[in-house]
Image: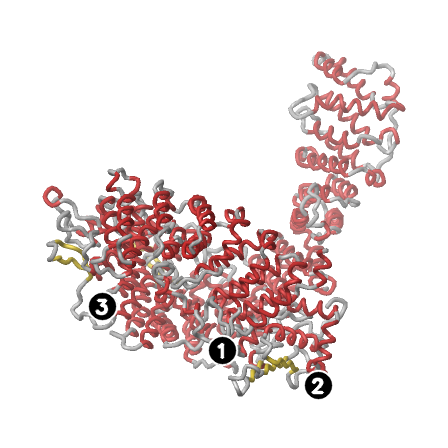
Amino acid sequence: MSGREMDNANPTILSISELPSRRRKDKDGVDGPEDFGIQAIMMAKPSYAMDPFYLSDYSDTDSDDSSLEPIDEQEVYDLIAPISDPEHPLSLASLGVVKLQDVHLTSPSDLTNPAALTRVLVELTPTVTHCSLATVIGLGVRVRLEQALPPSYRVEVRIKEGTHSSAAEVNKQLGDKERVAAALENANLMGILKKMMKPCME
Amino acid sequence: METMESSTSVAEQKNDFPDRTVSEYVELSSNATQNEDELSKITIDITGRIELGTEGKQTFSLFLRELAPFISPGASLVDSAIVSAVTTLLCARIRFAEEENYRANIKDAASALLSLSLMKNFLKSDAVIILDDFFRLSTSLWTQQIVATRLAVYELLQNLLTNHREELLKQDRIGHKLAEGFTGLAVPEKDATCLRHVFPIYVSLSKDRQAWGINDEDLEMIWDSFIRYYPIKIAAFGRKNADLSKPDPLILRELLLQCFISTSGYAQWSFPRLIDLLDVQSDVSADFKNDALKTLAACVKAYDQSTIDTWAPKLWDSLKFEVLNGENDDFISGAILVIRELTQKSTIAISESAWTNDTPLPPFIINLAAEMSQRLVEPAQRYTPQCAKILSAVASVNPFTFHAIVRLILARLITVYQSLDTTAKKDNMVRLFNDLIKACSISLQGHDLVNGSHKQALKTLRALQSPLVEIYFEAMSQPVTSDADEIKLRMTTMKGLSGLFEIPDYITTKQGVLVEGLPVFEVSSFLSEYEKGTIVDSLSKVVLVALPSNAEIYVQAIAALRTTAIHDPRMFAKITLENFLEALPKSVASKAETEDIVHKLESLARIACGDLVVVSPAYEDSVSQNPTKCQLFFSFSNALLQKLESVIQHKSQGRYAFVIVAALYRGLLLFDAALDQHSTQGTNEVQDEGLERPNGVYGDFIIRLYRLCTQRKDNKTLNSTYIGLRHLPCGGEIFDDKFLTLVGKYAVAGLRSKHVPASASPLNWYSQKSSAGLNQDKSSKGEKPHDVWALFDQHIKYDEENFEQYNCVSGPTDKCSANILSMSLLAGSPKEVDHRLNITQAAAYMVRNAISKSNGASIDARMSFIYTLQLLVNKFGVLKIPTDSESSLVEVLRKHVQDAATYGDADAFRVYQTLAYVASAALLAFDPSHSMLIEMMIQNLQLPSRSIKVAQSFKILLAPSEVIAEKNACFVRPLAKGRLYALVIPYLITEYSKKENAVFRQSYLIALAAVLSYMPLQLIKADAPRLLPLLLAGTDVNNAGDDDQTKMDCITVLNNLIPEVPEVVEEHVDSIINRMVERVHNTMAEPSDASPPCRKMALECIRLLAVHSRPVVALKRKPRIMRELEVASNDVSRTVRAAADRARIFWFNVTDDEVKEDE
């Protein structure tokens, strides 16, 4: 933020390899040394796997809907992890603002009811207790999740207890739907949020 | 600067002489060379022209122009008196330049003087006059001169210093004159181009200050003159919009550095100035500080030792502060570099070959070690990492400094280590030991192995070897939990252990006997056998645990074991390999056991095959049985082959055997990659080493594997001999097709390796014959059939009636499966291999084998027939061999295709499949017959009940293949794609619009998508308007067994086209959205007909529309798309949800603002 002194000019940064991202692992295709090498050689598909005369024998297991993959905490974390901090050119995950263990999902008791709501609670840990941008970050996380998750998910974003000096006030703002809606009408704020979301587009 | 002198006498004479041109003077002087009076007159005449009255400027310009041809390169005025006269005239112009009439043409005068000064006839004493006259110029006049003038003068002065040095040196107080004169001129200089000439003049004067007689006062004058430019700001010169006529600021920076280091005399000013720059941190940018450190290092390197000895304590005070308290890695590295230079300088007088344990240590090192030692004994251990950097930098300078540091500090540190109370502190201290161990190896590099007194360095270390190694052993024996410090310490310890292996022991190295004229050295290791064994054993234990608890420790242990192995392959064979083999069970019963074996063998492959053995120079000189670079790979492969032999003797061990072959293959791939890496570094000895083995590096292992799974058998029905699969006493199905395919892959990788020359291939018949000890009677029984068919069986003899390995029309099945191995040999061999086979006949058999209803061949075996056929077509050119029309391969296939009309589906499909593969091989080789073969495929599209399968077979034509690939020396012509496009696409487009039959229309779409999916975008783009409707129709195709391949192909092509032809896409945007939404919409009530990968691609298509459509077009569709994306965000597949999320963000950003901008 130009023209303003940073709240925390020297934050602790986690390396990308330390972050529990499922998307990164899927992208890299590795989970550990065993995934390469002999195991891969043994699992290799035959050279004719894509031959249309044999295709049905070797079709990809990923290509059917037999396995349901419900939305879990990891998926919610992966949605918000890349959001950029408004102060530093770093992701919220690498700054430790969002943590996998602070994403909570509560499924409805009646799973057969399509109208039942799932509750998502994300607790944020600001890098410093006096962080003046905690509300903007919280708003970013909330907007991101409301955009990405299905309508049957209710999103709640809060400041983790004991991590911010004005946590109650920030939580009040983040929990107030009307305030959030009004904030999103503000063009400047939307500009900041769009900038924060940019890494999610990559 | 002096005032102008009177020139009355010259002026008085002016009117006595007529105005002459320079040509006339030259002519006169040529004719008057023998007449001194005439010459004198001419000279006076020229000199007289100095007084030119009010027309002076113009006349002088004219004179210079006239003079130019006579002083151009190569030209020469005839007489030295004339040269001198002209020089005098020009000098006078400079001398009187302060007067209005004489002011012009200084540049031309300087240029002319430069030319004159380069002439043979130039009077050397005139050099001093020229210097004097230029030094007289007033500052006000000088600063008015343009850059070109100043540049010409600097060039002239630089030339005089260089070419007339001897004459100048004869002058009294020339040093002072030069220093004062040059600095007087250069003081106001700011132009970069001029400075490029000024700095070398300073360097020249300072470097040779004794000869020039430049005293300290004069030197300070020069220093003051150039230090004003330090430090040179790179940014100030505007790197981005650099003026190309100006020199690169980096060049100026280097020239200025040369000024700094030109004489030790500058130390008294340079060091304080540079130290100030280091100390006043806040005022100095990072670039300046880095530059100051580099300048310091260069000064220390260049100045003489006595100067450095004087300054070393002061420099050390500043530098240690940078390292101990610094936070910027660049500054720390810069300071370390200066410390290294100080160390180097402090030991420069110590003869490498003469020092002993009693040689006094330099005070600089003693002080440094004492201070470091003091810091390291502090209980808090705050500075250990920083001290490690300093100590390792000093110790790695040369063997003597290593000896000094070990002697002064190591023993004390070993004691300190024992008292450390936390794991973190221990880790820091072990890191320091590691750095010193590394420094040992670095300091010994490039020194005489046998005679150098640097052996003393190792002796000094050896005195502390036992307690040092004990520290590592003790650290390795500590249990490791999940505590980060414990993990760090374990990693550091393992690094140190492998570092100890890297220290060569030259103490006991001695030259042995001469063998064939070459000396044999005996190099033992620094560590004892017991120590090495213990290290390898402890590292093996880390790797051999069933499931490593910490991936980092596991990877480090593998790296450490690899280091130990490449430095001591004997120890690897004796301990590491043995440990691993012992850990492998005789047989396995459970999946978990197999997984454990996979883990162990993966570790072993990485250790043994990831790098080449380090062969010391001593070994390289020897001809004895010393380790070879490939020894680890050989030991690994031998051991696993032995294990495989043993495993296959047990019942139901197919999986185990398969794992071992996979490990062998993995090892080969790793080792070949290591060879690649070494060859890119310019090391080619490995190929030579491979050449020494008759079958190359991999050949013997390929032969052993092949022999292990095959055996000669009799076919009683046909009364013939063939190579089938080996019969094992325990029964079972160890040698299944998957196993054979992997063995085949091993052979292909080994045969096609660029590190095995063709002459050393195991497929070389002649060397094979000699290595097998065969001496067959060619006249009676003929030659042994080629190993492509005999599969390395030593006893098979060539007889057409009894041995037709390629005839598998009637089976038996194991003979069919053995073709997997033959095919692999053909795939891996070079094109030029002498396979000694009637390939036309072999190809005909392969067609029959592939479509045979009765041979019972498995899928893999049948595919091996097809691949062999492809290789014969593409690589060995069977279609180019002239035959009668009926027996040509194309006609054979045509006949089978015609007959297939009467076959059942399964049999007919085998024919269509074979046709597609042969067509592909011919197309990729651009064989002329490809048109006929593809035409046959197109004809088959008209078969109502089979057209869909035939259409699918078009996918085979350009599909990537493991067999028909350039790495297998096959032809993959780039033109093939364009050719196929021309042959097929226009036809399919036309026929699709003509046909009304739904099945045919669907078939055309399938074939179209199959071909387009591998086509370059450039080809498709041109036809985009015609293709888009068909591609959209293709996204709707539903056909059983295709697994929505056609849909995916069509959407992929569509996605590629959207960014390229957005205007064409816009015409169909609603159709595209409709089709994609249909694919994407997947709910319990309305499931999609598309698979998750297909839905993901459809979402990507939707996303691309947001990016590449005009905002006004996108905005109209946004509400509908956002609704559908909301549905997709609840898809059952995670990858689909992720794609939906990505698309939503892009569509979210489509706003009114963009439309306004667009408008």
Farthest-out residue, front: B996
Which subunit holds the residue at mark 3?
B
Q: Marks 2 and 3, how far apart in space? A: 70 Å
Q: Give the residue pinned by disc 3.
A: B733
Residue at 70% over, 20% down: B77
Across and down, in percent, residue B1062 comes to: 60, 53
Which subunit holds the residue at mark 2?
A
Label 2 crowd (10 A; few <14 / some 14-19 / many >=20): few
Contact, CB < 8 Å: mark 3 with mark 1?
Answer: no
Which subunit holds the residue at mark 1?
B
In the figure, is residue B784 to the left or right of B142?
left
Provide the secondary structure element on which disc 1 rests.
helix
Amino acid marked by disc 2: Ala
Across and down, in percent, residue B757 comes to: 32, 48
User: Residue B1104 occupies which quadrant of the picture?
Assistant: bottom right
Q: Which mark is residue A168?
A: 2
Label 1 crowd (10 A; few <14 / some 14-19 / many >=20): few
In the figure, is residue B940 to the left or right of B364?
left
Provide the secondary structure element on which disc 3 rests.
loop
Amino acid marked by disc 3: Glu
Amino acid marked by disc 1: Thr
Q: Marks 3 and 1, how far apart in space? A: 63 Å
Q: Which mark is residue B415?
A: 1
